[in-house]
Structures are given as structure tokens and as C-alpha cells.
């Protein structure tokens, strides 16, 4: 049974990693497009629909950046630092008391492990779900961004 929990735990971590990789790829593409677009843009001398579309493009680019950045930066929680699996809890609890950490790990029995790994599975599931929702929003606003780029390019 322990191997099943570890498999589920590692699978969820893999999903999180994939969401973060997708966000990194889109961010790279966005930065390239933004740099090219800003450099090639000729600002009109007065207000025009072209300028309005450009402002809307920048607005959608900003929203998309926000969602994608939220995916990449980790959501580190240290509430109730009791886990012997979650690195942030280990850091908070044992940073200044390594001997206690060694003792706790030596005495880490099967029931404690089971409870801890199940807690991590649940926590990581919430994180993974949150990251994929943010990724969907980021893709949506990236799509709007590309639409405005095409409109601006061909009007």
C-alpha cells in the first residue's frame, strides 16, 4: 500500500511540474513577442483605434503574465509544520535543531508515514488543481493577446 501512496504522490508532483513547464514555455514566447512587438510599434501622433488596440493588447499581456507567474512561483505553506515529507516543514521545524530532526526521522513509523503521505497527496492535489486553473486562464488571455497582435499587424 505504501508504494501506491508514493506513486500517487509522485504522479501529482509530475502534473505540477508539467503545468509549470507549460507556463515557462508560454512566458518565453510572450517575452519574445512582446519585445518584437514593442520594438516594431510606431506610436500614432494622436488617439486612434490602433492605439486603443495596442493598449488592450498590453492589458491582456499583463493579465496573462500575472496568471503564468503565479503558476511558476511555488505556493509554500508552513501552517502546522508537522510533515516529515514536505521540505518547507522540515526546514521550519528542524533548521536550528538537526538532532531533533534526526531523532524524529529515526522514529518515523509506518502509520505516521501513511498519514503524512496522504496529507501531502491532498495538499499537492489542491496545488495542482490551482495551477491548472491558472494555466487555463493564462492560455485564454494569451490567445486574446495573439488575436490583438494579428489585428494590429494587419490593419
Image (tube, rainbow, N blue to C red):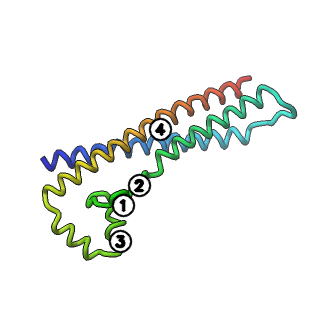
In the rendered view, would you say 56 is above or below 109? above
The disc placed on residue 95 is: 3
Q: Position of residue 15 (x, y in %)?
A: 34, 42
In the rendered view, would you say 137 is above or below 91? above
**Disc 3 vs disc 4: Cβ atoms closer than 8 Å?**
no
* Mark before the other along the chain sequence, 3 or 4: 3
| Residue shown at the point (77%, 31%) measured from the top left | 51
- Toward the front, the furthest residue is 80
* Mark before the other along the chain sequence, 3 or 2: 2
| Residue shown at the point (47%, 51%) measured from the top left | 73
2 or 4: mark nearer the eye: 2
* Mark before the other along the chain sequence, 2 or 1: 2
Q: Is residue 83 found left or right of 143 in the rendered image?
A: left
Q: Which residue is mark 2?
A: 76
Query: Distance from label 2 to label 1 (Cα)?
Result: 7 Å
Query: Distance from label 3 to label 4 (Cα)?
Result: 33 Å
* Mark before the other along the chain sequence, 3 or 1: 1
Element assignment for label 2: loop
Q: Which residue is mark 4?
A: 134
Query: Distance from label 3 to label 1 (Cα)?
Result: 10 Å
Q: Which residue is mark 1?
A: 88
Element assignment for label 3: loop
* Mark before the other along the chain sequence, 2 or 4: 2
Query: Distance from label 3 to label 2 (Cα)?
Result: 16 Å
Q: How many marks?
A: 4
Image quadrant where one finds the C terminus: top right
Q: Position of residue 144 (x, y in %)?
A: 59, 29
Amino acid at each position: 500500500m505504501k508504494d501506491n501512496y508514493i506513486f500517487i504522490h509522485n504522479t501529482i508532483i509530475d502534473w505540477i511540474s508539467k503545468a509549470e513547464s507549460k507556463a515557462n514555455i508560454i512566458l518565453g514566447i510572450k517575452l519574445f513577442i512582446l519585445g518584437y512587438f514593442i520594438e516594431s510599434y510606431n506610436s500614432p501622433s494622436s488617439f486612434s483605434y490602433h492605439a486603443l488596440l495596442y493598449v488592450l493588447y498590453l492589458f491582456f499581456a499583463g493579465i496573462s503574465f500575472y496568471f503564468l507567474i503565479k503558476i511558476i512561483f511555488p505556493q509554500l505553506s508552513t501552517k502546522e509544520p508537522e510533515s516529515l515529507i514536505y521540505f518547507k516543514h522540515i526546514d521550519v521545524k528542524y533548521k536550528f535543531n538537526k538532532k531533533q530532526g534526526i531523532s524524529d526521522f529515526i522514529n518515523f513509523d509506518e502509520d505516521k508515514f501513511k498519514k503524512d503521505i496522504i496529507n501531502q497527496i491532498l495538499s499537492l492535489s489542491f496545488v495542482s488543481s490551482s495551477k491548472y486553473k491558472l494555466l487555463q486562464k493564462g492560455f485564454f488571455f494569451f490567445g486574446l493577446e495573439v488575436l490583438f497582435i494579428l489585428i494590429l499587424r494587419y490593419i
